[in-house]
Image: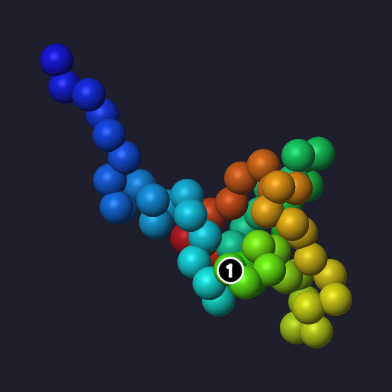
Amino acid sequence: MKINTPTKHDDQLYEPKDGNRYIVILHDGRKVEGQWSAVTSRFYLNQTQSIFVLRQEAFDWWPANV
């Protein structure tokens, strides 16, 4: 019996990378686009970084360029 284990490729899909832009699904179903910051664990939605979504507020995310 083969057990599926996460691969490095799987981690790249689910772990946001610093500086990359993502489409973020919020728990209430809204979709927003933001840039991930590993330092603050936030998706910033604007250039001034005054509007953001905390990682725990995000239900799911995927790269914006997909």
| Front residue (pair 28, 6) | 6
Seen from this angle, which residue lies furthest left?
1
The residue carrying mark 1 is 38
The vertical placement of 24 against 60, above or below, is below
Left or right placement of residue 7 versus residue 19 in this view? left
Left or right placement of residue 31 versus residue 38 in this view? right
The vertical placement of 57 against 66, above or below, is above
Seen from this angle, which residue lies furthest bottom?
48
Residue 11 seen in this snapshot:
yes
What residue is rendered at 14% in x and 15% in y? Answer: 1
The vertical placement of 66 against 28, above or below, is below
| Front residue (pair 46, 37) | 37
Seen from this angle, which residue lies furthest right?
50
In percent of width and height, residue 54 lies at 74, 57
Please, what secondary structure does the residue beneath circle 1 have? loop
What residue is rendered at 53% in x and 72% in y? Answer: 18
In percent of width and height, residue 25 lies at 68, 47
In percent of width and height, residue 44 lies at 72, 70
What residue is rendered at 69% in x and 64% in y? Answer: 42
The vertical placement of 27 against 25, above or below, is above
What residue is rendered at 31% in x and 52% in y? Answer: 9
Instruction: Count all numbered tags in the image, as a single digit.
Output: 1
At label 1, the amino acid type is Ala
Seen from this angle, which residue lies furthest top?
1
Residue 43 seen in this snapshot:
no
